[in-house]
Amino acid sequence: MLLRSIVSIAFVSCISMLLIWLIRDRKYQSINTVATAYDKWTKDQLLERLWGEHIHLGFYDASSQKMDFREAKVAFVHKLVQWSGLDQLPKGSRILDVGCGIGGSTRILAKDYGFEIIGISISSAQVRRASELTSDQLTCSFQVMDALDLNFPESTFDGVWSVEVGPHIQDKQKYADELLRVLRPGGVLAVADWNKRNLQDGEIVGIEKWVMRQLLNQWAHPEFASISGFKMNLLRSPFCGGGVDTEDWTRATLPSWNESIMEGIRRPKAVFGLGLFSVIKGLREIPTILLMRWAFAKGLMRFGVFRSRG
C-alpha cells in the first residue's frame, strides 16, 4: 500500500513538473496579487475539500506521527495556544486573528477557549467563506483588512494571533509593528511562520537559489524572513513591551508536506468532484509542496514560532 502511494505521488509529480513550466507563476507584485491568489483558491474550494477548514500545517510530536492530517492541524492550534501563553487569558478576552483564512483557527479559539475574536484576511472570498462556515453562537466575526494597515486603535486586543502570514508581507518591520500596536500592554502575541535559513548559517547558493525562487514566485511570496530576523523586527518595534521568545518547530511540522499530497490520494472525490480544471490546479501545486518539503528537510527553510507581550 505504501509503495503504491509512493508510485502515485511520483507519477502525479512528474506531470505537475511539466505543468509548472506551462502555467505562469504567481509572482508577488503587490498585496493585490496575494488577494487574487487566495480568492481563487477559496472560490474553487479545492483546498477546503482536501485539507478541511485549516490551510496551515499540522503538528506531529513523537506520539502522533500517524495522526490524521486534519487532526494534526487542530493539534497545531492548541499547541501554539499553550506554548504562547494565550490559554492563560480569561474567557471573553478579545483576540485578533491576522490572516484568518476561512476561519478554522478562529473558530477553535472562540469555541474551545471562549475568546471574542475578529479574523481578518486580505481575501474577500476567504472572509465570505469564513462567515458562511461560522455558527451565530460563536463569538467571532470576519473582516477584509490589510495586515499592514490594521483598522484598530492602539491596545485594542488582549491577544494577537497570526499563522503563516509573514511570507506574503513585503515590509516585515511594518508587519511586526502593526501586530504589536494593536496589542494591549501585557497582552499575548502568538506568531507562527515559514522562515528562511539565517544567512549566517550558510549562504543560499546553487540549487538552493532556484528552489527559493520557486517557493517565492509560485505562492505570491515577496520574501521570507529568518527566525532571528523577524525576532529582531519584533524587538525593534516601538510597541514591544517585553522580550521575544522563539522556537523551531520544523521537525514537528515536516510531515505535513507529504500528508497534504496524500490527502488527494485518500480523498480523490474531493478533487475529481470539482471538475477537470480543479484537478489540473491541484496537480499544479504538487511541485511547490515537494520543493517546500525538501527545503524544510534540508535546512533551507525553518518553521519558526514567536511569542511576546505587548
Image: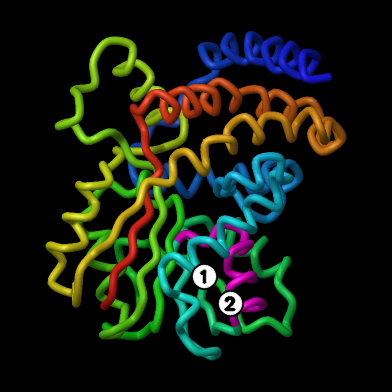
Q: Tell whether 118 sits left or right of 216.
A: right
At x 35%, y 85%, the residue is: 156
In the image, residue 225 lies at what x, y percent?
A: 27, 43
Kindly indicate the quadrant of the structure image that contains residue 3. top right
Q: Are marks 1 and 2 in contact (CB under 8 Å)?
A: yes
Which span of residues is magenta-colored? 99-113
- Callout 2 secondary element: strand
In the figure, is residue 212 to the left or right of 49?
A: left
Image side of residue 27 versus residue 109, left or right: left
> Residue 188, image x and y in percent?
36, 76
Label 1 crowding class (10 Å Cα cut-off): few <14, some 14-19, many 20+? many
Residue at mark 1: 119
Q: Is residue 1 left or right of residue 192?
A: right
Can you tell which mark lies on residue 141?
2
In the rendering, at what x and y percent does residue 169 appear?
A: 32, 49
Q: CA distance from mark 1 to mark 2?
A: 6 Å
Q: Amino acid at mark 1?
A: Gly
Q: How many marks?
A: 2
Alpha-carbon neighbours of circle 2 within 10 Å: few (<14), some, or many (≥20)? some
Residue 104 in magenta stretch: yes
